[in-house]
Amino acid sequence: MSHIEVSVEGHVLEIRVNRPEKLNALSPEMYLDLAQALGRLDREPDLRVGLLHAEGPHFSAGVELDKWAPIFAKAQGFPVPDGGIDPFALAGPRCRKPVVMAVQGYCFTWGVEVMLTTDVRVAADDTRFAMLEVKRGIYPCGGATLRLPEQMGWANAQRYLLTGEQWSAAEALRTGLVQEVVAPGEQYAVARQLADSIAAAAPLGVEAILRSSRLTRSHGEQHAADHVFDDMVTVMQSDDAREGVLSFKERRSAVFSGR
């Protein structure tokens, strides 16, 4: 039985972590299923956005370290399956479509590292974040050392990376790691609303925004500026662009097809 459950509602691929009896600890098998879910999101044209969330009072207390330790010791990285996309965005191409994430309770280690690869995040106000690796004799290898300083600020990130201390949802909001903090139990509904809003937008435009934004991060502002019109011809010649103009003239909401 998989502890990663995938379902489709509208244009949203929901990815649910469902192992609450183990505090949603990440096993190698769960990693493979997460990678396959992201690969599906990337491949299927009718899917426009992913929504990652977890069952139970906690998003995750961390990884099953006893199972991961032999894999980490080989220093070969994470075992991305054929057709999958690395949830930590360390190996191979990234998913071209946006992912919204909802968290609650414990959001430790891999939960933080996956969150750093997502695009919009909602946290319950009881969420506690932590990178605990230095308390276990190891260090983070899922991308936190790469992305937490950039997204949270250098000194803010090092405070938590180097100590293993926890930080609150309020601190995550203050530093920009999450975009909304809500009452416990409301995080999924708010994240779902955001995912639906993204899914209602023009898919070609959404993907172009992600490409340009990521290019800025990886290659700098000037390089991204030099390529900002790369997708414009394709987008402007699309059915969605015509629908956007027509809906403007007719004073109605646009209905986009992704073509």
Image: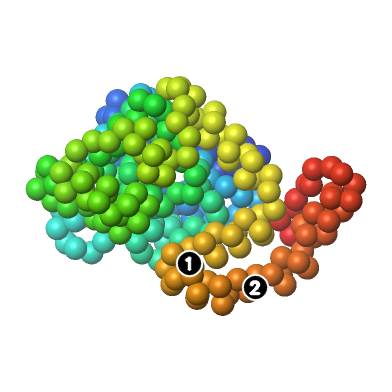
Dot 1 amino acid type: Thr
What label sits on residue 133 in the rendered view?
A: none
First in sequence, mark 1 or 2: give its number: 1
What label sits on residue 216 in the rendered view?
A: 1
Dot 2 amino acid type: Phe
Residue lying at 54% horizontally and 64% vertically, measured from the top left: 211
Q: Is residue 154 visible?
A: yes
Looking at the rendered structure, the secondary structure element under dot 1 is helix
Q: Are marks 1 and 2 in contact (CB under 8 Å)?
A: no
Q: Position of residue 85 (x, y in %)?
A: 43, 58
Looking at the rendered structure, the secondary structure element under dot 2 is loop
| Residue furthest right as drawn | 250
Residue lying at 27% horizontally and 36% vertically, measured from the top left: 167
Comparing 225 with 188, the one in front is 225
Q: Position of residue 248 (x, y in %)?
A: 84, 50
Left or right position of 244 against 90: right
Depicted 49 relative to depicted 56: above or below: below
Task: Quadrant for residue 111, please give it.
Answer: top left
Q: State the separation of the CA atoms marked 1 and 2.
A: 14 Å
Q: Position of residue 165 (x, y in %)?
A: 19, 38
Residue lying at 14% horizontally and 58% vertically, measured from the top left: 73
Quadrant the C terminus occupies: bottom right
Q: Is residue 58 visible?
A: no
Depicted 123 relative to depicted 227: above or below: above
Disc 2: which residue: 229
